Each structure stands twice: as C-alpha cells, then as structure tokens.
Image (spheres, rainbow, N blue to C red):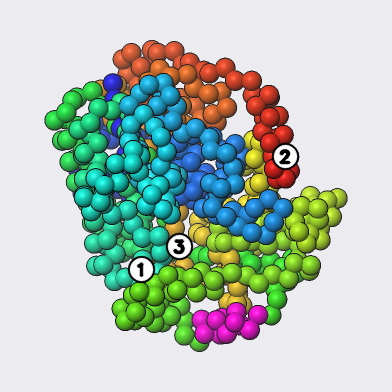
Amino acid sequence: MKVLVIGLDGACMDLIKVWTREGKLPTFEKLMREGSYGNLESVTPPLTIPAWNCLATGKNPGKLGCFGFVQKVYKSYDFRLCASLSKKEKDIWDILSGYGRKVFVLNAPNVISAHKINGYMVAGFLCLSEKNLAYPEGLRDLLRDMNYKRGSPYIIPFLTGSDYEISRMLEEMTESICKVLFHFLEKEWDFGFVVFQELDGAGHRFWNRKDILLKHYQHIDRKLKEILNKLNDVDDETNIIIVSDHGFGPNKRVFLINEWLAREGYLKLRKKPSLLLINTIIRVLKEENILRILKLLMKCFPHLLPLYESLFRGAMRVPILWNETKAFCYGNWGMIYINLSGREPQGIVKEENYEELRTEIIEKLQKISVKACRREEIYHGPYLELAPDIIIQIDDYVNSVAGKIGYNKEFTEGFIFEGYHNRMNGTFIAWGPDIRENFEINAKIYDIAPTILHMFGVPIPKDMDGRVLKEIFKGDLAMQEIKYQELEENRRIKKRIKELKRSGRI
C-alpha cells in the first residue's frame, strides 16, 4: 500500500461542493463520489503556520511551540521565525521514515529547512537558503535543471502584479511542483506529501471575482487528473488524501486591533515623525494609489525590491511606549500579549492583575462583537507559556485582524486581500482501494497524522490530539486495530518544562 497526501493550501470545501454539483470540477467530483470527503476544521486562528505543523504532527500549537509564521521571543519584545524558538516535533514523514518506509516531501510550508530522511525532501517557500532547500544534496542540481519555481519570499510582487501576471505566476508554480512530483512518483516510495499553494493565492487575490477563482480551481482539477493518470501508470494500490490547511471566505471587515487597544488606553504609542508621515501619506493617497506607485517603482527599478519590501514591512511596525502599555498586538493575526511585569522587559501589569486584565479586555471586545479567548481555552501542552495571552477569533463578523496604526478607526474594509482564511470550511477528501465510497464526514486538522499512521499499521503517539478517522475505511483497514505508542506523558512534559526553565523561557 502507498499513501499520497496532496495538500491544497487554502482549498475551500464550500466552493468545491458547489462547483462539483454544477459539473465544473469533474476530477474533484470523481474523488468525492468514489471516496470520503467533508469539511476539515483548522486551528485557531487559521493561519498557514501553524496549521501545516499541526496537520503533520497531529498536535496542537501548545505542544509544538509554534503559533504563527513569526512569534514573540519569551521575555523579550523581539519576534523571530517560529522554528528557531522551539524543539522540532516529529512529522508523520519523520515517523514513517524511522519505521523504514520510503518517503518524499515536496513544498510543505512547515518544512523551513530540508533534513535527512529515508527518501527525498524539498523545503517549502519559507526556506531562506538554497543550501537548505533539498535533501539529499544532489537533489538541488535536479531542481535547478527542472527550473523549479517555489514562489517569491516577497509580498510586494503579489500585491502590485496585474491579475494576468498573478494568475500566470500561480499556475506556473503548480506546473513546476507537478514536474518534480512526477519525478518522485517514478521512484521507490511508500508515502508522499506534496503541497500546492495556487488556491491560497487565488483566494486572497480573486475571492470577489469567482470567474477567475473558478479557473484556478479548474486548473488544480486538471492537475489532479494528471496525478491520477500517473499513479495508474505506476500501480493501482495508492490511497490519496487531499487536505487543506484552512478554508476561505470574504475579507469585508478587518479589525484594527492596535487602534482599539490604543483607544481603550491599553496601548501607548511613541510619537514617531516617520510613522506620522507614512500615515498621513496613506490617508491622503489611499492604499490603492500607494500600490500603484509601488508598481511603477517595481517596473522602473526592480533591483530595489528588497529595499521596497523592507520599507513596506517597516511601515507596519508599531512604535510602542512600553512603560505606559498594558497590552499590545504584533503582526496582523489578532494575538494580544499582556505587558506582564517579570516576564516582559518593561512589563507594568502586576501578576495579581493579569487575570483581571484579560477578562476586562475579552469582555470589552465582546461588546463590539469581537470574539476572543484565553490561550488555555485553545491550546494545551508544555509550550503554553510561549502562546499569546489572548487570541481573537476570525468569524463571519471579523474576517481578519490587522495590527496597523494611524487609520483613526477600529474597523476597515478588506484591502489588498479580497479573501481571507476560514477555520471551518477546509477540505478533506480520501480516495483509493481502501477508502469507503460516497461517504461524507467532518474532520479536524489534528486527525490527519494519526489516520495516516494507522493506515501503515504504525503505533500512534499518545500525545497526538487527533483521532483515527476509522469510519472512512473499508476492508482490512476498517477491521485493523488501532495501535498506540506507550509514552510516559507526565515524565516527558516535566522534562520539557525543565528544558524551558534552563533556557530562560519560563
């Protein structure tokens, strides 16, 4: 038996169901009719990172120490890539590789640096160094010969490109990944994991233009057919699992969290002339016109892209007056930190007032219909102390959260991104000789890893948070007993806490 996981970043099950009923996605329709399918619930908040980390490990962020692309360093106001702040947990491919299975991993967003494995690995778009892109080392030469395109680390080209340019770029990335995938499929393998990001980019850019968005779903539909044909040429024993890290929805209402914190007196800002100038320019020119200027600069001086990107991201930073601030939010994802005395370098909130302040902020947010919760209500595990203190929920009322300052309002219409992530309508489809036909099921992102381990008869670590989706199977897999790996959980957690204390994180 073989298992191929096809990750479709941002694939929205709501759209797939509608367009399959209308006969517009024939391959998706075949896979769902002949297999099991349903919505896949993502993490909170539904971000690409840590969603792929959670899917690949079966564990919640509190057990991974990963809560976003970048996150706050414990006892510091600095932010770094999440991978540098915690010990890496084993992904399903690491576990299967350890049991002697031949595996390949291609473009998984949570793989920032390729590492030794029993097979092949190509890191995702967050990989910062070509040197760390692939394992084994000789694979890099093959990728270069194939003209492998893994996407740009810069956001400005995505924001300033024309619709045609963005569509072409997204499709070219898919074609490039498929070329490498077909090469791997011809090798000896037991388990494969590949991620396509076309639908995520299309969802952000074209959510309000369903004709363009449909074309991208149809492009993926055709690629899925090619993959099926390729597998059929090689063997007929492969089970396919299609998953997304989150779903999608409209981005009509953006909550400006730091504007609200400032108005409520929790956040104090330093008067920074450069920030005042930037905000004045934004208000006068409007963001749409600023992007037009950036587009012109890109056309005339493309070699200055790193400089534009640095200025663009720098403009999003919030100049905080720490000795007068009780709570703050970094980034654009609704993660609130309490400026706690003894934990933060210039913390002013006493420990005895910590819980009272969290309750106060959450209740005030509820009055303006913004849902928020304490970190321990969502996460659990040895890394809980690294999590934000309060997490804002993305829902039908608050489509996304931004940390921008200087707009003189708490809510704004969605801009730059027409669509944004949705936690509840991610995609799950399973198809193959061992999969039950025409069966609808709702699953959670944590369920994927234990389900795959069960398919291989590999013991499932007891600290995984998901369950085996046993009801999707037929034949021997439906009857197969679920095996669990015995772990001394309490001992492991105590050991991790000691490590955190030694490193100064607790």
Q: Left of 320 or right of it: where is 313? A: left
- Mark 2 and mark 1 lie on one chain; the one further toward the N terminus is 1
Residue found 55% across the figure and 64% down from its top: 402
Q: Is residue 470 magenta?
A: no
Q: Examine the rendered structure and indicate whether residue 207 appears above or below residue 427.
A: below
* Percent position of residue 195, x then y: 34, 44
- On the image, numbered disc 1 is attached to which residue? 157
Q: CA distance from mark 2 to mark 3?
A: 43 Å
Number of other residues with Cα within 10 Å of mark 1, as a class: few under 14, some 14 to 19, many 20 or more: some
Numbered disc 2: secondary structure: helix
Q: Who's the residue at 16% across and 28% down the image? A: 234
- Horizontal side of residue 326 vs 15, given as left or right: right
| Image x and y of residue 208, in percent | 35, 64
Q: Is residue 194 left or right of residue 389?
A: left
Q: Amino acid at mark 3?
A: Asn
- Up-down: is 421 above or below 493? below
Residue at the left extreme? 233
Q: Which residue is mark 2?
A: 502
Residue 364 appears in the picture as rendered: no
* Secondary structure state at the residue bearing disc 3: loop
Q: Amino acid at mark 1?
A: Pro
In the rendering, which numbered label is found on residue 251? Answer: 3
